[in-house]
Amino acid sequence: MTKTIYFLFLFFVPLISYSQTDTLKCIKKNNLPNEIKTTDLNLASNGNYFWISEYSPTGKVGKVYKVDAAGICLDSLDTYNTTCIESDGDNLWIMHDLTDWLCKLDKNTGKILDSIRIEIPEVFKAPYQSSDICYLDSCIYSIWPYCWCGKYRLLKVDLRTRLTIDLGDIPTFDKMVVINDTIWAGSRFGFGLYSIYANNSIITSYNRSLYLGGFDISCLTYKNNSLWVIDSDSNLMKEFTYPFPISNGIETNIFGNKISIYPNPTSDYITINTEDLGCDDGLIEVFDLYGKKIISEKQKAKKHKLALKQIKSGLYIVKLSNGKNKYNSVTLIKN
């Protein structure tokens, strides 16, 4: 019996090897509001406040709480039973429990203002339920387990067209957060986060993890340059800091022009293409996520090849500057 339980537990934890782990520093711990009675929660932020949804048994009224950074409940809404919650700044979005309906809520009354049906791929062979959602660039992304054996799918709903896009399989992650235009994800019991989606494509190389600590991650969100996590083991809302990447792009638009860096991910070298800028004499700098400069090299052509064999695998920030012009940074994945 013991061996069977152990096997099942391992099966649902991401079975991937990662080359580097960075530990995030917890700088604040707040008790959850007394009004919250369960540990099955979901967390969102609109930049000013937190929204915490409390899962209730099917058939009962669901609750959404408006909470400040000190963990004090400012308001609560009665709404339909929710699986997960997200904010796009102006609106609240929920996944209706045990359905494939994405719903927009009135933040003052909890009433549903709009709903979009997610088009579930034909590959789904069993009852399905979204495990988490996040908002990025006018789209809602959602994670869906679609097989008893632990397969997970990432789906995207474009709120402008209301169409569902099947992005494909991901490791067995069930929690998501958007950090500066990149989707990071992790398992509830895995304790680490990994970048899984950027530049309109799934990231297939998992070279760096962000370690939060040995506790059950109920839910997480990103607010004011900090990662906020609800620890359901201790019923605490924790704030973590880290030098998170500013952007995660292969191409950066500069005043209508374009800088291209490719291949990304890469293992040996990258080409920095500034033909659209007409620039061939900039300074190329590579930094790690702690801000330490790893490489500094003068650009010698509009298509400059930069060797990377000498640096370790992981995430890096590539910056290009030319005199007084400082161009946006691009995040590089080094295999």
Image: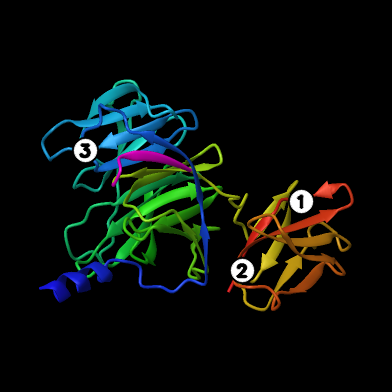
Instruction: Specify whether residue 135 is painted magenta.
Output: no
The residue at the point 68 percent across, 73 percent down is 311
Position of residue 192 measured from the top left corner of the image (x, y, whole percent)? 42, 59
Q: Is residue 7 above or below residue 227?
A: below
In primary-sequence order, the first of circles 2 and 3 is: 3
Q: Quadrant of residue 316?
A: bottom right
Task: Determine which residue is flagged by label 2.
Answer: 264
> Callout 1, which amino acid?
Tyr
Q: Are marks 2 and 3 in contact (CB under 8 Å)?
A: no
Q: Residue at x 31, y 63 (%)?
A: 152
Give the foreground label among 2 and 3: 3
Mark 1 residue element: loop
Residue at image mark 3: 38
The crowd level at tag 2 (other Cα within 10 Å; few <14, some 14-19, many 20+) is some
Q: Label 3 crowding class (10 Å Cα cut-off): few <14, some 14-19, many 20+? A: few
**Disc 3 to disc 1, how far (Cα)?**
47 Å
C-alpha span from label 1 to label 2: 18 Å
Relative height, residue 227 to residue 146 (above, below): above
Q: Judging from the image, what secondary structure is the residue with disc 3 in?
A: loop
Q: Earlier in the sequence, mark 3 or mark 1?
A: 3
Residue 276 locus on image (x, y percent): 78, 58
- Asked if the magenta segment contains residue 235, the reply would be yes
Which contiguous range is marked in magenta? 233-239
- Which amino acid is tagged 2? Asn
* Mark 1: few/some/many CA within 10 Å (<14, 14-19, 20+): some
Depth order, front residue of 42/110? 42
The quarter of the rendered structure image containing the C terminus is bottom right
Specify whether 179 is left or right of 272: left
Residue 292 seen:
yes
Give me the disc on residue 327.
1
Question: Residues under labels 2 and 3: Cα distance?
Answer: 43 Å
